[in-house]
Image (tube, rainbow, N blue to C red):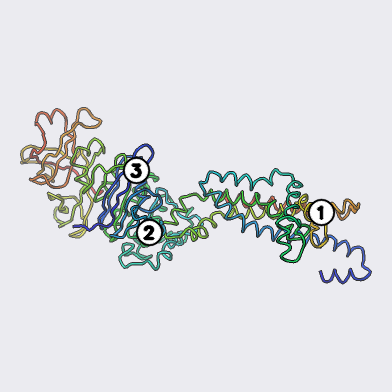
């Protein structure tokens, strides 16, 4: 359904272990390169940008940027990448405006109608909310503002792919929360593939559509985010996930009850308040503690959202001995969105919770991610 | 100069003669220092860039050679330069192309000597400044489609500006103050190789204390201004 924008296959030595990865990134949406620190994620990103050189083949929309067999290695300044570094690395001798414009002039002549995701200067300024900063010196910006300018600067160099290397990791919690919504808004506004490196599971869940899981220099899994985080039990233990994220689409607001109806994969959910026009997509968060499981359909309950689901996995909780971690998928057939919940060990044993069991999930609270 | 020349032709008052004896070396010194500084920036910048960015193992050997004038007695350097610039050295061969016998005891010879002697004072600050620019800004420039040449001029040089200022000021000042090398390879030819520092030596030799005082005082003020301005440049660079 989604054409390939970037294909990567590289090998090389990286400290004590060997890097050997191959994966593809689709044209739309955010793909996360996710894995523990030191697993080689940043190296892969640097290779794609041409800042580092390992053996292999890298092609964007069919055009090879590197092909070691053919002796091809395009230098970084000839590759149409937008790169956002961990620290913003804005040029201190230039104003915010001149930083934003740095790549614009240089990218002229290699312009294609679809490059840069189709944003111009005003579009990028508006998209990242940096209009009031244009005349400022970069030294006066906050950490969050710097990263927003850095993203804008990268977009304006008319890239065919946007690479982000842990752009939030150097920021404090408040600045992260300030920048995240801007990043979340990117895919809807840009026709540009985004490859996002992170070791923070919450960040990945809030941003990414797809995940490429990197462990010790290898791709250990990849696919849609819910599939990767669900399936093979990696979710709970490795990722210490205490909430679930799902994408919902508004299909109606009922002024009488004050509830907005959302369609998510495998279920319908109601959320308090008006959450936008029909068709708007929102990322929703459900805390594990707000979900309880019932074996038979609850008849009289105060909980608004009760949905059918199937159990995907039951595993020990990573920290609390009294709990087990249960992952469920929405829908009677159990193919919908993934939700995690914690169940008391004693109750789980009494109810004999097991894989593929049919359950009802009561969801007490849902919020915007 | 024209006025001074006319005055000299006839019976000239002592004051004017003295003025000329100080004015001529002063102009020559400023000319020498200006030409030397410009050449040092041209030669020193790529050298400093290479020293700052290269991963070559022998780059510290090159750095040591560049830094040698810091510790070498000027007379030693002057002695070898005299041989190199003289009729039997490479300088002599170049000189012969222009119909001269030697580059020693000429302004060109002085410039060559000064460039070598002051090289470390220019290369070191620029190298430090280039190192402080760091890889990240250069990489950011590359991902924004700047070729290495473009990134050098638009990112590295502007960011290293304090280093260039410090290097230029030190190179200029050091050339103004050099004595040993000038004496070895320049001699003391008025209007050609007699710089201020040599002029002082000459005034003292001939016991003209007033003139010596004047020139020495001038150089003290100059030295103070130089040191103060490099300190101010450094301070401003740190605030950037």
- At horizontal 24% and vertical 57% (from top left) the residue drawn is A4
Label 2 neighbour load within 10 Å: few <14, some 14-19, many 20+: many
- At horizontal 13% and vertical 50% (from top left) the residue drawn is A268
Q: CA distance from mark 3 to mark 2?
A: 21 Å
Which type of secondary structure does the marked residue at label 2 adopt? loop
Q: Which residue is mark 1?
A: B198
Total marks in image:
3
Q: Which residue is mark 3?
A: A40
Which type of secondary structure does the marked residue at label 3 adopt? loop
Is A33 positioned to the left or the right of A266 in the image?
right
Residue reaching furthest to the right: B11
Label 1 neighbour load within 10 Å: few <14, some 14-19, many 20+: many
* Callouts 1 and 3 in the same chain: no
Classify B10 as above or below A321: below
Which type of secondary structure does the marked residue at label 1 adopt? helix
Classify B159 as above or below B8: above
Q: Which mark is residue A79?
A: 2
First of labels 3, 2 by sequence position: 3
Residue reaching furthest to the front: B88
Q: CA distance from mark 1 to mark 2?
A: 58 Å
* Callouts 3 and 2 in the same chain: yes
Q: Which mark is residue A276?
A: none
* Callouts 1 and 2 in the same chain: no
Image location of residue A178, percent across then percent down: 35, 50
- At horizontal 13% and vertical 41% (from top left) the residue drawn is A362
Can residue B177 be seen in the rendering of this structure? no
Image location of residue B123, percent across then percent down: 62, 51
Image location of residue A191, percent across then percent down: 28, 61
Label 3 neighbour load within 10 Å: few <14, some 14-19, many 20+: many
């Amino acid at each position: 359904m989604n054409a390939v924008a970037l294909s990567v296959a590289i090998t090389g030595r990286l400290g004590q272990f060997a890097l050997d990865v191959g994966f593809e990134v689709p044209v739309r949406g955010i793909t996360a390169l996710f894995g523990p620190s030191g697993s080689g994620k940043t190296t892969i990103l640097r290779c794609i940008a041409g800042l580092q050189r390992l053996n292999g083949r890298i092609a964007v929309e069919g055009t090879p940027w590197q092909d070691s067999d053919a002796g091809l290695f395009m230098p970084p300044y000839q590759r149409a990448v937008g790169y956002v570094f961990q620290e913003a690395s804005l040029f201190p001798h230039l104003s915010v405006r001149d930083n934003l414009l740095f790549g614009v002039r240089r990218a002229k002549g290699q312009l294609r109608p679809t490059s840069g995701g189709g944003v111009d200067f005003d579009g990028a300024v508006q998209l990242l909310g940096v209009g009031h900063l244009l005349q400022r010196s970069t030294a006066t910006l906050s950490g969050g503002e710097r990263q927003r300018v850095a993203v804008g600067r990268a977009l304006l160099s008319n890239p065919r792919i946007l690479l982000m290397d842990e752009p939030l990791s150097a920021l404090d919690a408040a600045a992260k929360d300030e920048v995240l919504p801007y990043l979340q808004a990117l895919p809807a506004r840009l026709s540009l593939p985004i490859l996002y490196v992170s070791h923070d599971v919450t960040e990945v869940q809030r941003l990414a559509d797809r995940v490429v899981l990197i462990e010790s220099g290898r791709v250990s899994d990849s696919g849609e985010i819910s599939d990767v985080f669900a399936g093979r039990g990696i979710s709970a233990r490795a990722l210490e996930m205490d909430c679930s994220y799902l994408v919902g689409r508004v299909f109606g607001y009922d002024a009488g009850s004050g509830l907005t109806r959302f369609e998510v994969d495998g279920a319908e959910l109601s959320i308090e308040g008006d959450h936008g026009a029909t068709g708007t997509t929102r990322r929703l968060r459900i805390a594990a503690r707000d979900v309880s499981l019932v074996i038979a359909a609850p008849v009289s309950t105060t909980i608004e959202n009760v949905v059918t689901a199937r159990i995907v996995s039951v595993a020990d909780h990573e920290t609390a001995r009294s709990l087990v971690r249960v992952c469920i998928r929405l829908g009677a057939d159990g193919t919908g969105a993934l939700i995690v919940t914690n169940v008391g060990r004693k109750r789980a044993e009494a109810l004999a919770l097991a894989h593929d069991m049919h359950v009802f999930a009561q969801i007490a609270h849902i919020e915007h991610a | 100069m024209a006025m001074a020349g006319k005055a000299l032709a006839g019976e000239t008052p002592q004051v004017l003669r003295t003025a000329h004896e100080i004015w001529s070396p002063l102009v020559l010194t400023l000319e020498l220092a200006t030409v030397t500084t410009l050449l040092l920036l041209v030669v020193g910048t790529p050298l400093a860039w290479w020293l700052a960015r290269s991963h070559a193992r022998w780059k510290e050997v090159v750095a040591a050679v560049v830094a040698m004038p810091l510790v070498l007695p000027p007379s030693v350097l002057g002695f070898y330069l005299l041989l190199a610039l003289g009729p039997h050295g490479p300088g002599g061969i170049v000189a012969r192309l222009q119909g001269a016998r030697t580059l020693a005891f000429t302004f060109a010879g002085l410039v060559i000597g000064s460039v070598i002697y002051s090289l470390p004072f220019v290369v070191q600050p620029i190298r430090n400044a280039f190192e402080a620019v760091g890889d990240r800004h250069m990489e950011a420039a590359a991902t924004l489609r700047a070729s290495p040449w473009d990134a050098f001029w638009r990112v590295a040089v502007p960011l290293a500006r304090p280093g260039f200022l410090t290097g230029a000021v030190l190179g200029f000042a050091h050339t103004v103050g050099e004595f040993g090398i000038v004496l070895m390879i320049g001699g003391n030819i008025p209007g050609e190789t007699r710089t201020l520092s040599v002029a002082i030596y000459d005034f003292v030799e001939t016991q003209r204390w007033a003139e010596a005082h004047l020139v020495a005082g001038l150089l003290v003020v100059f030295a103070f201004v130089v040191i103060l301005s490099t300190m101010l440049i450094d301070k401003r660079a740190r605030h950037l």
